[in-house]
Image (cartoon, coloured by chain):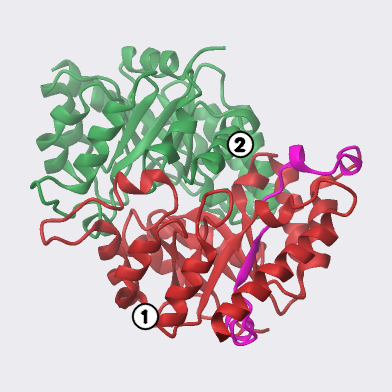
Chain colours: A green, B red
Amino acid sequence: MISAQEKLSASNKDLKFVCVGLDPDINKFPSHLRSISNPILEFNSHIIEATQEFAAAYKLNFAFYEREGISGFETLKKTIELIPDDILVIADAKRGDIGNSSRMYAKSVYEFFNCDAVTVNPYMGEDSISPFLEYHEKLNFILVLTSNPGANDFEKLKLEDGSFVFQKVCRKVEMINKNKNCGIVFGATRLNELEDNFELFKTLPVLLPGVGAQGGDMNGIVNVFKKNKKSDFLINVSRSILYKSAKKDFAEAAGNELKSMNDIIQKLFNS
Amino acid sequence: MISAQEKLSASNKDLKFVCVGLDPDINKFPSHLRSISNPILEFNSHIIEATQEFAAAYKLNFAFYEREGISGFETLKKTIELIPDDILVIADAKRGDIGNSSRMYAKSVYEFFNCDAVTVNPYMGEDSISPFLEYHEKLNFILVLTSNPGANDFEKLKLEDGSFVFQKVCRKVEMINKNKNCGIVFGATRLNELEDNFELFKTLPVLLPGVGAQGGDMNGIVNVFKKNKKSDFLINVSRSILYKSAKKDFAEAAGNELKSMNDIIQKLFNS
C-alpha cells in the first residue's frame, strides 16, 4: 500500500500537478456512448486509460454519481477500481458531521470506496474533522476558500480581530495537522487571496478547483506556487479535459489536452 | 403528494414534536437480530411500525448507511419506502457544494431517495444552498448552530459587527426563504442561544438534534418554544428511543418511550 502522501509527492516530484476531475455528464458524452448499458463507466474507463500517464491525481465529485442513486454508487466504486494503484484518488464528497457520524463517512470513503483522500466541510468545527484524521495514510483536504460566488457569504466574513473566517479555518487546519494528513481546498478563482495568504498554508498540500469553466487562471496559480517555492499542489480540471472532443476521439483528445496543460505547467515551473 | 410543509404542519398541529432518528448501530441491536440477513432493515422496519403513531417525523443520518457502502444505500432506500406517506422524512445528509453539484445532491435525496427534507451545510454560501430551494414542496434545514463542541470553532466566531457567524447564516436563510421551504438546524444543547436568538428564526421551522446522548434538555427546549408561541419545530431523538431495550421487546419499548416523551411534551405545551 502506497500512502496518499507518497502518491502526491511522487506526482509533484515528476512535475505533474493536474488533477483530472471525473465528473461525468452524459449530455456531453459522444453520441456513440449514450446508447450502451453503462455509458458513465465506459466513458470513465477510456478517460482514465488516456490520461493516466500525465494525471497527478483523479478527483471524483460524488454528486455526479449520487444523482443516479444506487447504480451511481456502483459506477463510482467500479471507476475507482480502474485507477492505477500509484495515482491519488480524491473523494470530493464534502462530508462533515458530529464526530460519531464523521467517523462513518470516513469509513465509507476510505474503507468501502478505497479512496486516498477526501474533501471535508469544516463548518461544524474540529471534532467534525478529526475522525478523518485518524487515517494516517490518507489526505484530508478541508474547504478553506471555495471557487464559487457564495464564498463571499460566510467564508469571507470579517471577524472582530480583522481576519476572515476562511483564514481562521486555515489556521485551525495547520494546528490539527499532527499526523501530516491534512490539506486544504482553495478556489483557483481566488488568485489574489491565494497570494496574500500563502504564509497560512506553507505546510499544507493545496487542492485548487475552478480552472476552466469556472474561470480560474492556471498560469497565474502556477506562478504563485513557483514564486513561493511550494510544489505540493493539485490543480483540478474537469470539463476542459473530459469534453475536449464530443466525437469518437474523445479519450485521445482528453489525453492530449492534459499533456499540453502539463507541458505548459512544466515550462512555467522550470523557467 | 402531500408537501413537506403540510406534513410538518399536520404533525405539529397534533402536538407531535419528536422526530425519530433512524441511526442504526448493529452493536446495540438485540442479539436475535444480529444473525439475520439484513438486520438493519429488519430493525428499522420494527421501529417504524412501533413508532409511527406518535412520530412527528423520521430523520435518517446518511452516515449510518453510507458506512456500509452500496448495500447501505439499498437499506436506506428500502427503509424510506417503509415510512407512511403522511410522515415527514428528513435526509440528514449535510450536503452542500457549488451550484451545479448541489443540484445533483438535491436530485439524489429528493428524486432518487424520495425524502421530504434534507439538512444542508451552508459553508459555501447562498449558491450552494439555492439548488435545494428549487424544490418548492420540500423542506431544507440549513445548519445554523450545531450541537457538538466544534460549533465553537467557526459557527460561534464573532464578526466585526459584533454578531456571530451562525447569526449571519440564520439571517441569510430567512432572506432566501422566498418559497417558504427553508428551516434551520439548531443544536438542542444550545438552550441559551436558542432563547437569545429566537427573533432570528421566527418564520423558520427548527430541527433540534442533540437531546439524550448528547445532553440536550427536552423540557427546556419545549418551554422556550411555548413561551414564544412557536410550534413549528422538531426535536430529534435517536439512541434513547431506538435502544430503550436490547431485548426482543425493543420495538415495543421504543414505541412506549416515544409515547411517554410525547405525553410529557404535550403536557408542557398545554400547561
Q: Which mark is residue A108?
A: 2
Which quadrant of the view contains residue B202?
A: bottom left
Above-or-below relation of B167 to B265: above
> Is A62 left or right of A159, judged from the image as shown?
right
Q: Does A22 sit left or right of A178 as displayed? A: right
Position above or below: A221 against A69: above
Compared to A164, does B126 lie above or below? below
Measuring from the top left, give residue B207's x and y in whole percent: 50, 67
**Residue under disc 1 on the same chain as residue under disc 2:** no
Q: Amino acid at mark 1?
A: Lys
Secondary structure state at the residue bearing disc 2: helix
Judging depth in this view, the residue of B102 and A249 nearest the camera is B102
**Residue tagged 1:** B202
Residue A183 in the image: x percent, y percent?
A: 34, 29
Q: Mark 2 — on which chain does it sit?
A: A
Q: Residues within 10 Å of mark 1 (few under 14, many from 20)?
A: some
Q: Could you say where residue A2 lies in the image, as x and y percent from the top left?
A: 52, 12
Residue B12 belongs to the span the image colors magenta: yes
Q: Nearer the viewer, residue B167 or A79?
A: B167
- CA separation in Å, label 1 and label 2: 37 Å
Q: Mark 1 near mark 2, Cβ–Cβ under 8 Å?
A: no
Q: Is residue B81 magenta?
A: no
Indicate whether B144 appears above or below B34.
below
- Foreground pick, A144 / A44: A144
Q: Quadrant of residue A143?
A: top left
- Res A174 → quadrant: top left
At 19% from the left and 53% from the top, the residue drawn is: B158
Q: Quadrant of the N terminus of chain A?
A: top right
Magenta segment range?
B7-35
Residue B133 percent coordinates (x, y)? 45, 73
Residue at 60% x, 74% y is B265
